Image (tube, rainbow, N blue to C red):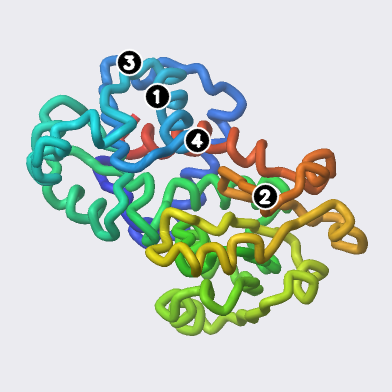
Amino acid sequence: MKNRSLVSITDFSREEYLQILDRAVEFEKNPNQRILQGKVVATLFFEPSTRTRLSFESAVNRLGGRVIGFSDASSSSTSKGESLKDTILTVSNYSDLIVMRHPIEGSARWASEVASVPVINAGDGANQHPTQCLLDLYTIRQTQGTLENLNIVFVGDLKYGRTVHSLVQALTNFNATFHFVSPTELKLPSSVKIYIKEKKLEYYQYTDINEAIQKADILYMTRIQRERFSDVMEYERVKNSYILNADMLNGTKNNLRILHPLPRVNEISTDVDSSPKAYYFQQALNGVFVRQALMASILGL
């Protein structure tokens, strides 16, 4: 993995995922090491972020590295008309690794082809979010003891949800059975369903969460993303489609764990937070350890 970019979760193999997850276990045991001392990581966030940006920066700081970059495109030279290519070429001169979030699909791939240093995609529009996928895999294995042969229920925005797209593609390597719950307008894209079919795995689609929740080993909730809608009326029509509350967990599997890439709006009621099946805040913490493992591997440390 040394000096390789991570743009799509398909850039790495099943074995490479597992290597990163195994290394993340060691960082969870001891997150404060100095192995990035002398290294500079650039975080270029052309789109707002809290957890992803801060967990990357926490990961770098805990490993003794330095962070440069911006958290708002308006504070970068792109606001003056500078092209993405010029930004990436310039920042490559100042850093050993670039972490980038951008609202346009395909932007991360373009950046990785231009940059002279590795690029990690921290989300490109509705396309991919591979580091979220890796921390999701880590969390699933942590809670279930395995990644193999699980029933995964995805709920909410499956059309624009880049976290869902990445995780589904990764889980096809582990013989998962998929259950997709969404409004008709927000169904999983055909390209992702074709990916599942090519792996000869099963998937089921629902509009009612109650038809799927009892089957779940992992219940992966997502918010309806207002920023992805060009039609405000369409957003208003679907925004409250699914709201998980504590009563809905009655009769679910004992091993069920509820995940969410966060931020949540109102799709998980706060009365779920006290349930032992709620795991989304631990999931967010796991992002630090997984991103430490990924950056160390890409930098050859």
Asked if the residue under mark 4 is in contact with the one under mark 3, i.e. CB atoms within 8 Å, the reply is: no
Front position in the image: 24 or 65: 65
- Residue type for callout 3: Gln
Real-space Cα separation, disc 1 to disc 2, in angstroms: 32 Å
Q: Secondary structure at mark 1?
A: helix
**Does any portion of residue 173 appear in the rendered image?**
no
In the image, taking residue 256 as reference, residue 190 lies left or right, namely: left
Real-space Cα separation, disc 4 to disc 2, in angstroms: 18 Å
Residue 256 tag number = none
Badge 4 is on which residue? 51
Rendered position, 149 above or below 60? below
Residue 18 pos. (x, y %): 51, 50
Residue 60 tag number = 1
Front position in the image: 177 or 273: 273
First reached walking from the N terminus: tag 3 or tag 2: 3
Rendered position, 236 above or below 132? below
Residue 37 tag number = 3
Q: Secondary structure at mark 3?
A: loop
Real-space Cα separation, disc 3 to disc 4, in angstroms: 23 Å
Q: Secondary structure at mark 2?
A: loop
- Residue type for callout 2: Asn
First reached walking from the N terminus: tag 4 or tag 2: 4
Residue 233 pos. (x, y %): 49, 67
